[in-house]
Amino acid sequence: MHRRDFLAFGTMGVGGLILPSMFGKVIAAEELSSAIDVAVKKSLADAAMNAAKSAGATYCDVRVGRYLRQFVITRERNVENIVNTESTGVGIRVIAGGAWGFAATNEMTKEAVAKAATQAVAIAKANAPTQSAPVQLAPVKGAGEVNWRTPIVKNSMTVPIKDKVDLLMGVNAAAMDAGADFIRSILFLVNEQKYFASTDGSYIDQDVHRIWAPMEVTAVDKATGKFRVREGLSAPMGLGFEYLDGAASGKTVLPNGVTVYGNSYDMKEDAIAAAKQARAKIKAPSVKPGKYDLVLDPSHTWLTIHESVGHPLELDRVLGYEANYAGTSFATMDKLKANFQYGSDKVNIVADKTQPGSLGAVAFDDEGVKTKKWDLIRNGKLVGYQAIRDQAHIEGKSESDGCCYADSWSNVQFQRMANVSLEPGKAKQSVADMISNVEDGIYIIGDGSFSIDQQRYNAQFGGQLFYEIKQGKITQQIEDVAYQIRTPEFWNGCAGVCDASDYRLGGSFFDGKGQPAQVSAVSHGSSTARFNGINVINTARSLG
Amino acid sequence: MSILSEAQAKAILTKVVGFSKADECTAQLTGSIRGNVRFARNDVSTAGITDNIELSVQVAYGKRVGIATINQFDDAALERVVRRAEELAKLAPENPEFMPAVEKQTYTATPTYSATTAGITADYRAKVAIDSIAPCRAEKLIAAGYLEDQAGFVAFMNSKGNYGYQTGTSADYTCTVRTEDGRGSGWVGHNVQDVATFNAGEDIRVAMRKASASAEAKALEPGKYTVILEPAAAAGLIQFMFFYFDARSADEGRSFLSKKGGGNKLGEQVFGPQVNFFADPAYPGAAVYPWDEEGLPRRKMPIVENGKLVNMEYSRYWSQKQGKPAMAQPGNLIMTGGTKSTADLVRTTERGILVSRTWYIRMVDPQTVLLTGLTRDGTFYIENGQIKYPIKNFRFNESPVIMLNNVEELGKPVRVKGDEADAPMVVPPMKLRDFTFTSLSDAV
């Protein structure tokens, strides 16, 4: 599930005191550059592990986490909110009597963590009698004492607030000058300082950075009462503040003149374009429903990959662990064994926890497994899932895929989606080449509305910008487009993927899963791709 | 100790406000103990407990605001957090829409706390899991479910003498039951403030019945149908619509409640005449704290009367700018109805579709609040007042505004929780004509 948290953030705390507790306590900006001494973290971890073992645990892992987040929220010419939050604490997971137990505390003392460890063991023992089979962990070799950091150029946490405010105020002014009626622009900056220790002999210190700069630009036509929103075309990234430099190397101008972005984002330029395109959306003709060949830009395709490939190939969903919340999967184990034809032979999809610049990149996952890249779909055939330590044996594998994650010290880690991406086509093909062969199609840029069923068969997607293609030419901007798919038919309709020169990442900063619900950030890369014969509906309605 | 007594909380808040040298200061303490148990594949998968307590301090110099928080409570720490907020405020840009802290208010306590819920133990949670799993194991069904309970408190004080303290509890149980062959699926949800009224062993039977009854589903053509939405199914659409009840967006011309040519639809007939919504912080079984996020006292407030829009959400800033009285944001949403059960509504339906639950609802077009989503966990065809057979799930594209203009009949309201927010809702089962299904889903 890709959550609608953007809206929730957009309206939070306007002059109010209540802060979203999921993001922890608010701190001063100057504290965002500091970290907890690694020796302190090790001593807390050892205290927890010793207490757990004494209480009867057969396995224990400890996550000492300091999660820093900064949000700068603006609308038009106002800064609505600047929030710095810190959440620090210790989460302890144990196996006792063959069952999992978990407890967490924000008290950073040896006594408190030892008490929490004992509590986790008690919880495991309370649940053990109901367990039909003991937890079985794929083996992991202790990593010893190691550390890793996202390869950033500029630490977003240490860029002065004034620079961030000036950037967003400049963006907003540019949009308003270009004809927008309203703009909301936001910076979300994340730094996870995560220390992981386990009874397997790992002490792993990681410093993870992410950035997102979303915006919503609105144009209103008072006479007709119509309004349209064009959201920004940026992607959340596993990069530092350098992502917002607007470097020319990050820009691609598409055949219809729309500029899209790769590893560098020009927010002001995009805001100006958004103002003009939002206005154009109001006047654009409404789509005629029917079957079309779709040409999908990577700024759009990431979400379709996320929902219709990333989620159904999570082993916990396949097995039923998410049946009560995120759902199960149509891609059942028998389909893996039979190498189910998930897509056409043009479709190659990989999971990757190491890809530089991606949201999911780390050296070790949240149960101490070294990360890797692996195949999910090869030449259209289903060849793999995403699995963690206590699931690997069910898939008949001897190792975890290294995609375990918790969004906080206070939540238990579990299987989360790796970066899942469509590989570019091997033959040279530009976007213009691809469009020149489309007789009757729609070109979609940017992600919009999205919804998919609990087994990931039936999905519906919108977008930000839609263009009609007739006889190989882009003819005009259109509106009210959404397409409905059945996942295997959609991917089997994939008629081509542009080459690597067009490859870009999109992603979700707030992908929701689990109970208690947790968010995770994940990237999805692709080049522009073509899908034939897709059902398009018209979404215009009248309230009378 | 995450739940402070009133005396403990008041002592801390008094010190904090006393430390402040800013033009104004508001301090708030929140604490909770949350326990949970999660099960799937007829086994417990995770269980845990988290406690946390936090002090937030907001100060203002003119229109410059600073916010800081801490979770230590000795005098030095309390003074430090106030100074930190003051430093941040001095660095912050002026917010032209700044609203000063509220004056001293009078709050009427609401029944938000249950000692039974606060007393839940790990063994209680384990029993809920086994009460759900054991009957499923016995009938070759597969259960996946979750119980989360919490006990907490909120206390706040500002430099204008305003003060509040109250404790609250809640528990949320959900369980999905599937047949072993994956062809049938049922669901039950029970959201309560007091677990004395909750029995997992009874609830699980609802999900089990639906799982068994929904196997062997037939496909119906998508199109417009008379539907009966159970309360949980209706809640998803209704909750989503209320995310867009903000008066400012409407006045700005970017809401379904905007009026052509300017202004909003306050006072207009927006829904069918059977439709009534109100908020009430003391509503039995769905009570919420008697203040909103800014400290304004919540009172019983009509929102829609006989289909007419009588109240919208005005922020303090926007109400002042528009010359309206400031009103607290509602914390719950109550929809009135009749006395009939879902089964009663089925009995009077010639042809229609019964929807147990809706899923993954998202906005398609904010201009009309066109929403898309799917049915799940038990969708049935009704003919001549009887459930004839289970049908495959549908995707719908429907606006709740249009839907609530097509009401045939409303049943007896019950407390439910939507998928997207925690605010309690009380919603009746509803019979609606011309509900728009646009495609079939193979999902079970």
Image: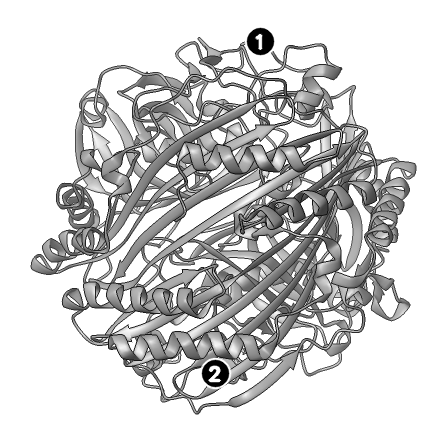
Q: Which residue is mark 1?
A: B268
The answer to which of B21 and A169 lies nearer the viewer is B21
Quarter of the rendering occupied by the C terminus of chain A: top right
Residue A73: which quarter of the image?
top right
Q: Tag 2's secondary structure? A: loop
A526 sits left or right of B286 in the view = right
Determine whether, in the image, residue B171 is placed left or right of residue B7: left
Amino acid under disc 2: Val
Q: Nearer the viewer, mark 1 or mark 2?
A: 2
Q: Secondary structure at mark 1?
A: loop
Q: Amino acid at mark 1?
A: Glu
Q: Is residue B229 visible?
A: no
Colouring used for the render:
one colour
Up-down: is A377 above or below B137? below
Q: Nearer the viewer, residue B432 or B6?
A: B6
Gap between marks 1 and 2, in whole Å? 60 Å
Q: Quadrant of residue A523?
A: bottom right
> Which label belongs to residue A369?
2
